[in-house]
Image (cartoon, rainbow, N blue to C red):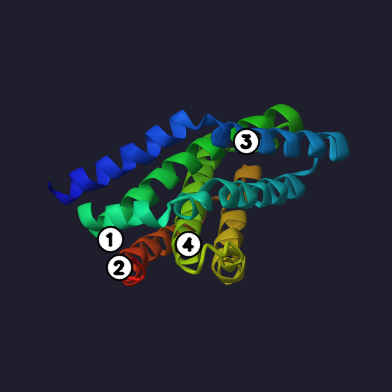
């Protein structure tokens, strides 16, 4: 079986589990809805910068809740089975692909609820939607990689917070800087910053493929 088929099969397995265990998806959706509702009752319609900051902070916590379980839910017996049927590169790429898809869906739902409850001060709608998707993908890659490390450290999820802070802050700053241009029709989105964000995402994928085999052997 080729690497692409291995990746697709493992991705399909995660997708089917998510469909069958819908309490996980609806639990995250409830978290988004409750958080946005509380924000709406507290500040109603915030100004542009506050709206932007709150949105990306909520995206961060959504990603932690959605992605952290991807590796932590795998038992030792199941990991041993995967060890015999797939390569570590195929396994980690399938996880990155699934978590990316999950976070893209969650990002769009979060944006929809923010717009419904808190209004939308965004001036450039479609560029902002594209940035939200790119940002959701970026966050999912970082925390998928960290979840893989945490799963091998006796499932210590606290490691994600310790390792994730210095990695995720630069990405959040880049995302906020880029998204600020969507609230002002005069400003243009800096292409260099956008390319830097994409380069960071590619670097994380490469690091995951290179380093995960060492965790896989443990």
Badges 2 and 4: C-beta atoms under 8 Å apart? Answer: no
Depth check: 15 or 154 in front?
A: 154
Closer to the chain start, of discs 1 and 4, is 1
Q: Residue at x 65, y 38 (%)?
A: 122
The image quarter containing residue 9 is top left
Please name the residue shown 55% across and 45% down the image.
66
Horizontal side of residue 206 vs 188, given as left or right: left
- Residue 64 in percent (x, y) is at 58, 52
Name which of mark 2 and mark 3 comes first in the sequence. Answer: 3
Measured in 3D between alpha carbons, the distance from the residue under mark 2 to the one under mark 3, in whole angstroms, is 32 Å
- Residue at the extreme left: 1
Q: Does dot 1 land on a helix, a strand or a loop? A: helix
Residue on which disc 2 sits: 213
Q: Do the residues labelled 1 and 2 touch (CB within 8 Å)?
A: yes
Q: How far apart are marks 3 and 4 (CA)?
A: 22 Å
Mark toward the viewer: 3 or 4: 4
Classed neighbour count for the residue bearing mark 4: other residues with Cα under 10 Å, few (<14), some (14–19), many (≥20): many
First in sequence, mark 3 or 1: give its number.
Answer: 3
Q: Which of marks 2 and 4 is nearer the N terminus?
A: 4
Could you tell me how far apart the alpha carbons at marks 1 and 2 are, in whole angstroms? 5 Å
Q: Which numbered disc covers residue 88?
A: 1
Q: Residue 16 carries which label?
A: none
Residue count near mark 3 (Cα–Cα under 10 Å), binned few <14, some 14–19, many ≥20? few
Q: What element carries label 4?
A: helix
Give whichever of discs 1 and 2 has the lower sequence position. Answer: 1
Disc 2 element: helix
Please tell me whether residue 130 is drawn above or below residue 213 in the rendered image: above
Q: Mark 3 points at which residue?
A: 27
Q: Mark 4 points at which residue?
A: 151
Q: In this view, does 74 lie to the left or right of 86?
A: right
């Amino acid at each position: 079986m080729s690497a692409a088929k291995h990746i697709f099969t493992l991705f399909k397995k995660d997708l089917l589990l998510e469909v069958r265990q819908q309490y996980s998806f609806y639990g995250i959706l409830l978290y988004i809805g409750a958080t946005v509702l509380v924000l709406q009752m507290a500040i109603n319609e915030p100004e542009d910068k506050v709206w932007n900051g709150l949105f990306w902070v909520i995206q961060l916590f959504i990603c932690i809740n959605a992605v952290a379980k991807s590796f932590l839910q795998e038992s030792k017996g199941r990991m041993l089975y995967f060890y015999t049927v797939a390569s570590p590169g195929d396994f980690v790429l399938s996880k990155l692909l699934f978590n990316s898809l999950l976070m893209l869906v969650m990002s769009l739902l979060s944006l929809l609820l923010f717009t419904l409850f808190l209004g939308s001060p965004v001036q450039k709608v479609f560029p902002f939607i594209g940035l939200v998707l790119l940002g959701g993908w970026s966050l999912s890659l970082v925390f998928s990689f960290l979840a893989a490390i945490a799963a091998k450290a006796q499932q210590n999820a606290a490691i994600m917070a310790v390792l994730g802070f210095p990695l995720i802050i630069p990405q959040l700053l880049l995302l906020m800087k880029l998204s600020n241009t969507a609230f002002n029709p005069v400003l243009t989105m800096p292409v260099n910053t956008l390319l830097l964000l994409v380069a960071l995402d590619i670097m994380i994928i490469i690091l995951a493929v290179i380093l995960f085999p060492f965790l896989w052997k443990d």
